[in-house]
Image: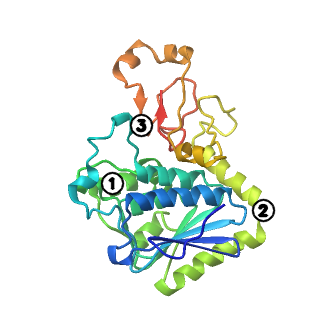
Amino acid sequence: MLTLTSSGPVLTELSASILVVTLNRPDQLNAVTPAMLDQLREIFLEADEDDRVRVVVVTGSGRAFCAGADLSEGPSRFDFRSTRAEAYRDKGGTVTLAAHACRKPIFGAINGAAVGFGASFQLAFDARLASTKARIAFLYARRGIVPEGVSSWFLPRLVGVGAALEWMSTGRLVGADEGHATGLFRSVHQPDELMPAVLSLAREIVENTSGVSVAAARRMVWMGLAAAEPARKPTRLAANRYPRPRSQATRGSYAGLLTIRVSAKALTVLGTRLLRTAPLLVTGASPVVPGQPFASGSASPRAIQV
């Protein structure tokens, strides 16, 4: 069962089946630490299992939504030399995947600046409502790093390939109106009207819908985006099955990368040339297997290990 917190860097409040999650480091523009990322991931996993929760709302305290990773530690924040490469995990990505796998609708109340992780993890939400003061930026190219938090999978599906490439290539700030025009934001509100609008949307779901129906619709929409055609029968490779965590021991690996073991027959189909030129470990994209229904890259936002 979800544990509610009334103090600390991440606040949780449950009222009328609506869970409000607030990033609470206003002096640091709600920049996230590794511990906060772990906490956010657990909140999404536990909200998914808690029958008291019908809808989740995520927002930030103060004038920012989330300024990304807390860099106050300096270069050591990105020093992973003591970590084995195969054991390294993108913590921001595990949060995004936990939100994506949650069976409850998640709405973002984007009250201010959202950059880096703050821009990436909200892409897995069902909808984002923005304040007129909201700004968003995928500034990875300006820091010499690649997009993280599974943003390269979600963003083009939300705003189109052209806008996604431009935003990621330039790393520029995108205003609330532009975000609304491209479909990233559902609507734009005055700052004092943002939370009432988000809570009104959440209450509409709580009071008028079946939780099972909403969960099924959410899953069907995301799986449909990965299907090659609407009537195609899912194959073993294309099926996107999310096991539910049943114990604390298994929750740590629940948001882990989906592992797909390709049979010897499928490897034969790939051909000798592809095996020589393509790595067998693919992160964020699926192998191209003739006859398999992978629509536009990966069948899911999870990395696929072959």
Measured as percent of width and height from the top left, residue 281 is found at: 41, 29
Using the rendered view, name the quadrant where residue 35 is placed: bottom left
* Inter-mark Cα distance, 3 to 2: 36 Å
Q: For the residues labelled 3 and 1, say whether their Cβ atoms are less than 8 Å apart.
A: no
Using the rendered view, name the quadrant where residue 112 is placed: bottom left
Instruction: Identify the residue shown where x is 65% and y is 66%.
Output: 55
Q: For the residues labelled 1 and 2, say whether their Cβ atoms are less than 8 Å apart.
A: no
Q: From the viewer's perspective, tell me whether residue 26 is left or right of residue 14.
A: left
Name the residue type under label 1.
Met
- Would you call the spot at circle 3 few (<14 residues within 10 Å), some (14-19), or many (20 or more)? some
Q: Residue furthest bottom?
A: 192
* Inter-mark Cα distance, 1 to 2: 38 Å
Mark earlier in primary sequence (1, 2): 1
Residue 210's disc number: 2
Measured as percent of width and height from the top left, residue 178 is found at: 41, 69
Residue 168's disc number: 1
Name the residue type under label 3.
Thr
